Image (spheres, grey):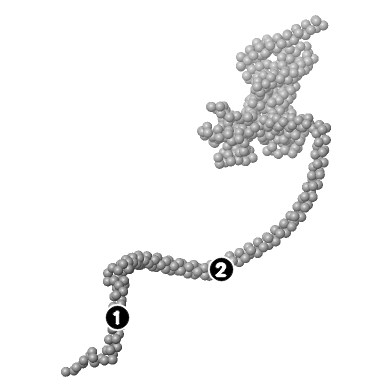
Amino acid sequence: MITAIGRTVREGVEGVGRAGHFVAESAGATRELRTWLPLATAHARALGVDSLPIALFIALFTGIVLALLASYSFTGAVPLYFVGTLVEKTVTLELAPVLTGLALAGRVGASIAAELGTMRVTEQIDALETLSYDPYAYLVVPRVLAGTVMFPIVVGLAMVVAVAAGWAASILLLDISSVDFVKGMRLFFTDFDVRYGLVKSASFGAAVTLIGCMCGMRARGGAQGVGQGATQAVVYSATTILVLDAFWAVVWLLGKSR
Amino acid sequence: MKRSNDFVVGLTVLLGAAIIIGATLWAQQVDLRKRDEPVLARFRDVGNVRVGASVVLRGVRAGRVERIELGRDGWVELAMRLDPGVQLPRDPVVLLNEASLFGEWQATITEESAIPRDEAVTRQIAEARAAGGNMLPGATLPDIAQLTAVAGRIAGDVASVAGRVEVAFDDQAARELRSSIRNFAAMSATLEQTVRLQSKNLDALSGELRLGMGRLAGSAESVQSVAQRIDSSTSTGQVRHIVDDVATAAARLKETSEEVRAMSRQLTRSQGQLELVLHRSDSVMAKINAGHGSAGLLVNDPALYRNSDSLVTELRSLIADFKANPKKYVNLRIF
């Protein structure tokens, strides 16, 4: 048992060390601008623009369900215009970044891990290294930068769509007027809500792409290794998103509320 | 393909950024034109008001709190951005109060004459106004926590009173209370009889009163009739004629009075002259009585009387002789 504990601790430390090394290598590779810059927009389109439909779809139904849940919870006790407050606060601060991040973790993280894993097991990455290409500058940096930039855009649009969906649901499905919903939404709205959500989603984007790249680059064996890498990428990305969510809440929200 | 990617990503980023920024500004109600200056108000304490809180005018949302800053001399300055076209009332003041039970505060702009009759609020308004400057005076109304605290104290006092009542209300007190209730019932019965008796008296009294009122009404009618007559006399000029006659009589009376006063003065003078005459007469009479002078001698000397009497006698006999023998005394010749 002691051996098992020792092995677990060692593997954990090794994992942290590998992750740190990977991040350091990626940061160092950003200097090779000519390598990664031409590839960045292609990855931005693949990770961001192509992810918009699924992100907005999730946001649409999130907003509707939130409005209905709020109305159900507030019946009789709390004024119904607080539905607008709850929808705005919940969407901008939490649900839009986290749900979109989780969805993109599945889509983007798995995609990157599978792609890089395949390149690894088919020795394409080795070939790049042989051709004096830095695999970090060529494969990792454009994806990470594209994810970091495009995640806030996707999440910001998801916020707008979710609040609009909640607004429409309040008018069409609930006994709340448009004026009341807007009043509640504006009641406690500050630009900090949006900034907090966007910064958080940028960190999610960086984490999901970094984890996807790391899991793909570490893939070993054949198709099974690629599948394992994709699965690990999704699991680690989802876990990291939740950890980062808590981190930002403790560091930023807690500090602000004090 | 590469250019297509660049265009799509660029368009998405620009559109996304524009939509996010636009939605944020709209939700924050940011006035980008900023043509109107914000309305400033001064408070000692702004309670739980936050930036973005509603500004209410006559119950209607008319703007939002734009800025809250600490000012000099312990003041807090609050900047409010009003909606376009909103006019401030005459003599405006700003009250900060809770908008709901859920911690939501608002700034209410109202006329000073419409503020609650509360000593603390009035004092805050007066203090803020006395500070001068181009800021509206403001006051903060107590929040629900303060009201709850006061209600809690009242509830505690009520509980204390109830506890004391409970202590005081033992078995003996209950018996005494029952006895008191019985006495009270008896007293009520007595009082009822008295009231019934007094009611009869009051009925009689009211009948008499009614009769008196009837008479009074008759008198009033008579007075009214007299008043009407006077009114009609006044209207035909009779009273005026009477008043003129009285005025004429008074003038004549005044003239007569002046004449009597003149006669009186003449009488006074005549009296003086008469007194002087009497005094002189008295003096003459005294001299006569004293036998001074010819008259005194004539009055007081009997010989003179007798000589006079003898003279008269002889004169009579002379006249008789003259009548009998006129020729003896008269000798008339012609040529």
Q: Nearer the viewer, residue A83 or B288?
A: B288
Judging from the image, mark 1 belongs to the subunit labelled B
**Disc 2 versus disc 1: nearer the observer:** 1
Please say if A158 is above or below B298.
Answer: above
Secondary structure beneath disc 2? helix
Which residue is rendered at x = 56% and y = 30% of the image? B77
Please say if B60 is above or below B69.
Answer: below
| Farthest left residue in view | B335
Kindly identify which numbered label has been placed on residue B232.
2
Distance of label 2 from label 1 (alpha carbons): 91 Å
Please say if A212 is above or below B310.
Answer: above
- Classify 10 Å Cα crowding around label 2: few (below 14), some (14-19), many (20 and above): few
| Farthest bottom residue in view | B335
Q: In the picture, residue B226 is in which quadrant?
A: bottom right
Q: Amino acid at mark 1?
A: Ser
Kindly identify which numbered label has been placed on residue B332.
none
In the image, residue A249 lies at what x, y percent?
Answer: 69, 21
Which residue is rendered at x = 29% and y = 80% of the image? B310
Residue where numbered disc 1 is placed: B310
In the image, residue B153 lies at what x, y percent?
Answer: 70, 30
Left or right: A257 with respect to B253? right
Q: Nearer the viewer, residue A26 or B22?
A: B22
Task: Tell me, yes or no, if residue A49 can be seen here.
Answer: no
Q: Amino acid at mark 2?
A: Ser
Q: Nearer the viewer, residue B221 or A26?
A: B221
Which residue is rendered at x = 50% and y = 69% of the image? B242
Which residue is rendered at x = 75% and y = 37% of the image? A174
Q: Are marks 2 and 1 on the same chain?
A: yes
Secondary structure beneath disc 1? helix
Quarter occupied by the N terminus of chain A? top right
Task: Tell me, yes or no, if residue A258 can be seen here.
Answer: yes
Judging from the image, mark 2 belongs to the subunit labelled B
